[in-house]
Amino acid sequence: MINTMNDMLCPVCGRSTDNQIDGRCRDCFLKTITLASIPLVVRTIICPVCADVKKGKRWDKLDKDFEELIHDVIVQALKINPQAHDVSTSITLTTTNPAIYRAQITVTADVKGVKAESQLVTEVRISKETCDACSRMAGGYYEAVIQIRAERRFPDKDEQQQMLELVGEVVERQYLRGDKLSFITNIQELPEGTDVYLGSNNTARQAVRTAVERFGCRYSESPSLAGKKDGKDIYRITYSLRLPRLVPGDIIRVGEDMVLVRRSGKMTTGINLESGLEFSEHTDNLKDSHKVSGVEEAGNAVVVSMEQDTVQVMHPSSFKQVTIKKPAHFTGTAGEDVRVILIEDRIFILPS
Ligand SMILES: [Zn+2]
Ligand SMILES: [Zn+2]
């Protein structure tokens, strides 16, 4: 064998080489390095309830598809030689069992100017563990109670249903925003209303505020000591949420007037049934005004005749002709039926 000027002999294998790396030929150099390694088995933990992934002590949202997660787990478990540059990795996954993925990994890189390649295999095993939030939910954990009530009356079924829907809406929104404790632990129906137990006090507060805006509710809150955690007192908050005393359709007496309530929050608005004019008053000033009837009590009466300021209708039970002041909203004509309501021997035409 004739060596040219540039050729040297590899001290390890004795073959001639034109380029020594670390004092040996390319093949002998590659034998001295480990380009990449990975344990034979890699594990990842997933919550079977919410599919969150455990990372160290934390639980993270699974915000990618499952195979991408397996790829990430492999890439994190790979140990690449620190001398490697321009590393590229390709992974082929096969699975016969949803809890086990087999991976064939090819790593290529440049090490000291030599192109190196490494073939690895590993198995990714997915184990299940219920995350902290899901265990709390299963354990009946709660930070807050919303008591759905009404001011000086019992809320009816529809109202309670509406409030439950509102709470459910806020619970879902806050969960999607990342509050993992945003769940309903328990719903208790009571004669005076409904109690909703919530995992997250923050969600409870948001729900209560929404109820105030949307339904004109009032609320008060009271903390109670629930125990200690890491030496700190843990409080649960009870929100007593009160629906307005007056609801649309109620007819209340305000002085000598009868008012059909359209809306009641901080202000109560409606229609003065005798004049047909708009009514508006601070609810606080209506403490002495009680419901005397409601639109559900209305019946039909025939309009007999009309004059400038009066209407004659046939009384629905005595069938006598009664003359009443024509309310501003009245648009009927003789012979037609109108909705009327009888309150204490007086007859009022309801707006249509
Ligand atoms: Zn060699
Ligand atoms: Zn979970």
Image (cartoon, helix red, strand yellow):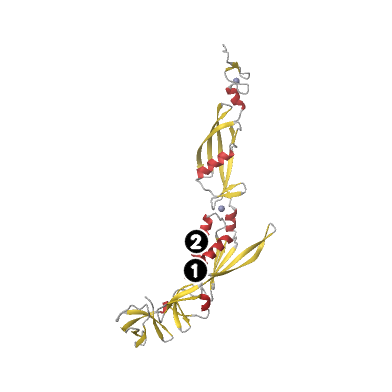
Q: Nearer the viewer, residue 307 or 55?
A: 307
- x and y percent of residue 343 in the render? 43, 84
- x and y percent of residue 126 in the render? 56, 45
Locate the C terminus by quadrant. bottom left
Three-letter code, disc 1: Phe
Locate the N terminus by quadrant. top right
**Toward which corner of the image does residue 270 lie, by quadrant?**
bottom left
Choose mark 1 or mark 2, whichever is in front.
1
Q: Which mark is residue 169?
A: 2
Would you name the residue on which mark 1 appears? 215
Residue at x-position 62% and y-position 64%: 236
Could you tell whether 259 is left or right of 330 in the image?
Answer: right
Q: Nearer the viewer, residue 230 or 214?
A: 214
Q: Residue furthest front?
A: 308
Q: Nearer the viewer, residue 271 or 91?
A: 271
Q: Is residue 185 visible?
A: no
Asked if the residue at tag 2 contacts the one at tag 1, i.e. Cβ–Cβ closer than 8 Å, the answer is no
Q: Which mark is residue 22?
A: none
Number of numbered markers:
2
**Which mark sits nearer the N-terminus, 1 or 2?**
2
Crowd band around label 1 with a 10 angstrom C-alpha radius: few (<14), some (14–19), many (20+): some
Q: Find out if the beta carbon at label 2 lies less than 8 Å from the nearest ligand 2 atom.
A: no
Q: Is 305 above or below relative to 100?
A: below
